[in-house]
Image: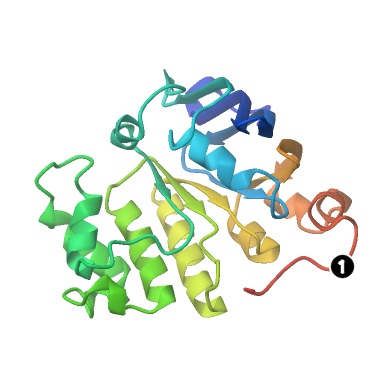
Amino acid sequence: MHTAARPDDVLLDIQALDVAYGKAQVVHGLSLQVRKGEFVVILGRNGAGKSSLLHAVSGLIPKQAGQVHFKGQDISNATPRHIVRQGLVQVLEGHRVFHHLSVQDNLLIGTYANAPAGDRSKLDAIYAMFPELADRKQQMASRLSGGQQQILAVAQGVIAEPALLILDEPSSGLAPLVIDRILDVASQLCTQGMSILLVEQLVDKALRHAHYAYLMETGRIAGAGFADDLRDSDLLQRVYLGGHGPAKTEAA
């Protein structure tokens, strides 16, 4: 928890959250915060409950207990549509785009949260930020490479102009250059005032970009701290790596 955070600085506030699939509880009494304009990363081994946490925050799966506040409002029982309209957007893991639509139509879908008819006025800014998409605006998303599809998925989240952009494992299956591209864009957005909450397996890359980090282990927060302090810490070695070997630095 950010002990120095003022109440008006806190954008996302998760308190004592429990999440379960049937009888299997996967998140246990978890609490964390993301402040305005902050880049926060959640680290943990596979099966730690990271994606389940994000899905619960975004309203994609039910919460068993606990509360989630966003911009000071209780969104614990809100629908995903309402949560997106409040300015919390999650980019799901796995290059989730509409394959049968063009790149530009995928981007226009991202504007529907605040403009039901689609808002073309934002396209130029997005193409400037993602020039690789500008060159392919009329191409079907199905014809993009995996890396290009992931960039499109991130751009689709960015064009909604969220207060908080959640990125779930954006590096999955991608080349290092694409991963760096996505994380650099996220850092740029953060300097412009957008908050970022990232779940990532690539420890070194994530900590180089983040301000603050939470370490998850078996559905619980096992530790937290400023990213620079955690990079070479014994806590990171114990929680994330079980005390063995170097941090993961390359895409699988």
Q: Which quadrant of the figure contains the N terminus?
A: top right
Left or right for 234, reference 124: right
Left or right for 15, reference 99: right
Report the residue at 47% width, 22% height from top.
76
Residue 143 x/y as whole percent: 29, 79
Amino acid type of disc 1?
Gly
234, 243: nearer the viewer: 243
Residue 1 appears in the figure? no
Residue 108 vs 226, above or below: the answer is below
Query: What element does badge 1 sit on?
Result: loop
Q: Which quadrant of the figure contains the C terminus?
A: bottom right
Would you name the residue on which mark 1 appears?
A: 245
Residue 77 x/y as whole percent: 43, 21
> In the picture, residue 49 is in which quadrant?
top right
Residue 128 vs 62, above or below: the answer is below
Report the residue at 35% width, 29% height from top.
79
Residue 25 x/y as whole percent: 68, 32
Residue 109 x/y as whole percent: 21, 53
Left or right for 20, reference 189: right
